[in-house]
Amino acid sequence: EVQLVQSGAEVKKPGESLKISCKGSGYSFTDYWIGWVRQMPGKGLEWMGIIYPGDSDTRYSPSFQGQVTISADRSINTAYLQWSSLKASDTAMYYCARPQVQQLVHAFDIWGQGTMVAVSS
Amino acid sequence: EIVMTQSPATLSVSPGERVTLSCRASQSVRSNLAWYQQKPGQAPRLLIYGASTRGTGISARFSGSGSGTEFTLTISSLQSEDFAVYYCLQYNDWPPATFGQGTKVEIK
């Protein structure tokens, strides 16, 4: 079964750092891009950025460039989303997702279960 | 960045009705358009990709049409499990790919 399993919910304080993970299984991890999508409470979906684990090619939405870092460790089939200094406005559900076509940035058809990040003093 | 605009924001319908949701792109995305369904507490589910191809296991009551800048998702006969929020996503021009703001389909 193809699946993405994300790390658990996090509660952090402003200014703290955080790295959340997304582990792929059931497919060739290095052949598919993995993207990250933000959903703030009660709001819509926002495309943050995407990484190709095969060569670590990473692209960001201008809205998120410099605010987060996307990375991947292909030895353990895991992608990451990290912050160096969290803000209250980073409070959201974060999803990782895989496009349905290998080697292409395409429609996401496999989604992780989401990681809730809450940032509050 | 391509802006995706969905209409209406909210649709109040009765079970069994035919529903049409719209998505407009600020510039052509060819047929690189997907539709998603999201229910509370769940990740989005892919319904349609390539503007008109149903995803794996998706009921035939869901259909998509359009190309270029104008797209439509039609639900032929709304079932109780279809009450949800629907998003379009263009993946023709990235980064970033861009989602519409969503249409909520609620019970009338």
Image: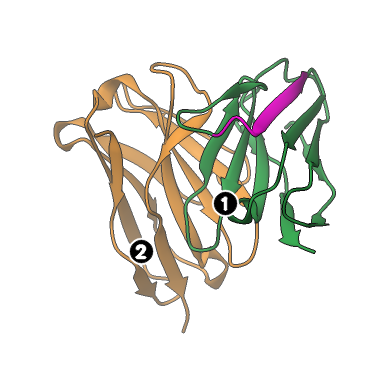
Chain colours: A orange, B green
In this picture, residue B81 sits left or right of residue A78: right
- Amino acid type of the residue that numbered disc 1 sits on in the rendered structure: Gln
Asked if residue B55 lies in the magenta stretch, the reply is no
Q: Residue at x 45, y 72 (%)?
A: A118
Q: Closest to the observer: A19 or A4?
A: A4
Element type where label 1 sits in the image: strand
Q: Residue at x 48, y 63 (%)?
A: B41
Q: Which residue is mark 1?
A: B38
- Amino acid type of the residue that numbered disc 2 sits on in the rendered structure: Ser
Q: Which residue is mark 2?
A: A17
Residue B62 in picture, x, y percent from top left = 65, 34
Residue range highlighted in magenta? B59-66
**Measured along the vertical axis of the image, is residue B108 above or below residue A78?**
below
Chain identifier of the residue bearing label 1 in the image = B
Q: For the residues marked 2 and 1, what is the alpha-carbon distance in whole angstroms?
A: 30 Å
Find the residue positioned furthest to the front: B16
